[in-house]
Image (cartoon, rainbow, N blue to C red):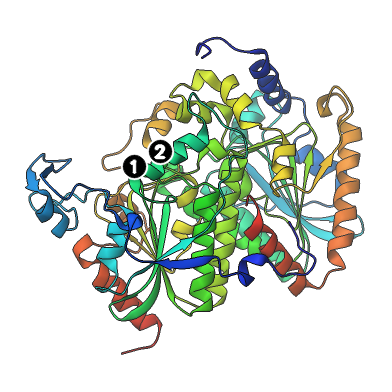
Amino acid sequence: MSSTIETTERERIAFAAVELARHPERPRALQVISAITGGWTELRGDRLFGDDRAVVGGPARLGGRSVMVIGQEKGTDPMTRALHNFGMPHPEGYRKAVRLMRQAEKFSMPVVCLVDTPAAHAGIGAEERGQAWAIADALLCMLGLRTPTVSVVLSEGGSGGALALALGDRVLALENAVYTVAPPETCAAILYRDAGQRARAAAALRPGVETAQRIGLVDELIPEPAPGAHAHASLVIAAIRGAVIRNLDELCAIPIDELVAQRQRRYREAGE
Amino acid sequence: MDRADGVTSRRQAPRNRLQAPGPELRPTAPTTGTVACPRCKRRFVAERYAADLNVCSECGHHGVVGAAQRIAQLADPNTAETLLFEVGDRDPLGFDDGVPYPQRVARARERTGLHEAFLTARATLAGNPVMLACMDFAFLGGSLGSGAGEIFARACEMAVEERRALVAVCTSGGARMQEGIASLAQMARCSAAVAEVIAARLPYISILGDPCFGGVTASFAVQADVIIAEPGARIGFAGGRVIEQATHDKLPEGFQTAEFLLAHGMVDTVVERSRLRDTVGTLIRIYSGRA
């Protein structure tokens, strides 16, 4: 058996893929929103406790229709990264998302979710205010929402914190994004009792979005020109725009009862 | 994946069958000799401890209960029919951390006598027809893999078909890391199954035992009409140790205990194990509009 310290070539490659997905210059939610929508008006707060800046959302125009756009924002420099808590939402973020999804349902506006989080925030306040409850509620909301939904995994889809915004009728993912049950560091801490073995965990977990596609959590990969979205932001954002509009066109043609039934059946079978 | 015909095989073939009490009902706690209370260390004759539902008569500590014992504790005597759903074995990642994952599952099966971390039964509870879905922490930490998720989802569907109230006992460390993203998908899958129970307007009561964390808490465990926690149970999303390491904050006294969550408005009630059957039975009777 290999020593626990030694990092094999396979592990280095696997972790390099995680690092590519975490590249600081990859397109972020706010950047995508401002580039692909018109009139996006940010609505803040969960109307219950506070405003979580890791989740941003509001109504906008996209491809000739009104939509609700909700995104997890990681920030682009040290100050905004801290402001947005590195894209790790507190319960208020999920409750705000649910509030906006309900509003979208009321106005028959499709919902677009931009997923980009290493995980939901782990902290005392988050637990006191029901992090698990907020995520569980968002899952049920997305499953039953009577309006079309498209989720896009931009870079990192980590844990239930990502899944809560990723149960769309269609789930798209950038080619170099990762989608995992938990960040490799957390998996290593759980599996090997050593967060330092994150490369080993990354190799074992197959974090690439093609794994998520294979088990039915992702439908479509959006290609990125080499070396990746960080070097070709405007091209990739244009591709996201095109893919979202095309999917919305298809979804809006399906009667809503049928769409919701299809969605629930699809997630009932996911990961079988 | 979407299926064009809208019909899934799971509804057609009766893949569940009833089983007479056998290996599945082997209790996880010893039934002979003595056992010590994990908190106050007081020793009890095993039979007496089991008769007290694994609750220490000295300090009130609620000990771990296996899924089969749970069913026996909640169901009316001689009414529980254990359901063995045939769920396929999955190893989506070919996972091997020194011990191949299928071998870990096989060992857990041998040790617990269970097929998966969930054991389900149809029964009556204080006279009400119910579907019991109980998790067993002894089976790989009660982790939510595709097998466990499928069993829970089938139990939900059977509850809907037979118009039974759903009673789940949740105790789990969370996702089954060895199945990776397929384990994450179980949160979606179990939520979709709960959505069917909700749509059928059947009562769903969730009982949270010690411990209950991660993707189990963040999905079906708290999607119930009534969330009951056992005294002292530790319940949350992220574990206390993870939070301490990540934030270097000192955890408040009693953090993430049932009582802490009750004070923060996250659970409906904290109920001692000896009163669970009565409490759940009363609730179901009221929700079902019976006297």
Amino acid at the residue labelled 2: Arg
For disc 2, the chain is: B
Q: Please state if B270 lies on the left or on the right of B91 as rendered.
A: left
Q: Please state if A209 lies on the left or on the right of A138 as rendered.
A: right
Q: Residue at x 24, y 73 (%)?
A: B77
Residue A267 falls in image quadrant: bottom right
Q: Residue at x 57, y 75 (%)?
A: B199
Q: Residue at x 71, y 62 (%)?
A: A263
Helix, strand or loop status at disc 1: helix
For disc 1, the chain is: B
Residue A75 falls in image quadrant: top right
Q: Label for residue B165?
A: none
Residue A168 falls in image quadrant: bottom right
Question: Label 2 belongs to which residue?
Answer: B107
Are marks 2 and 1 in one subunit? Answer: yes
Q: Is residue A28 visible?
A: yes
Cα–Cα gap, marks 2 and 1 = 6 Å
Q: Outermost residue, bottom direction?
A: B291
Decide which of A166, B173 is in the foreground and name it: B173
Whether B288 is drawn above or below B249: the answer is below
Whether B62 is drawn above or below B10: the answer is above
Q: Do the residues bearing badges 2 and 1 touch, measured as CB atoms within 8 Å?
A: yes
Amino acid at the residue labelled 1: Arg
Which percent across, then down, holds residue B195?
57, 67
How packed is label 1: few (under 14 Cα within 10 Å), some, or many (20 or more)?
A: few
Decide which of B115, B242 is in the foreground and name it: B115
Q: Please state if A159 lies on the left or on the right of A195 as rendered.
A: right
Q: Please state if B24 lies on the left or on the right of B246 as rendered.
A: left
Helix, strand or loop status at disc 2: helix
Question: Label 1 belongs to which residue?
Answer: B111
Q: Is residue A50 visible?
A: no
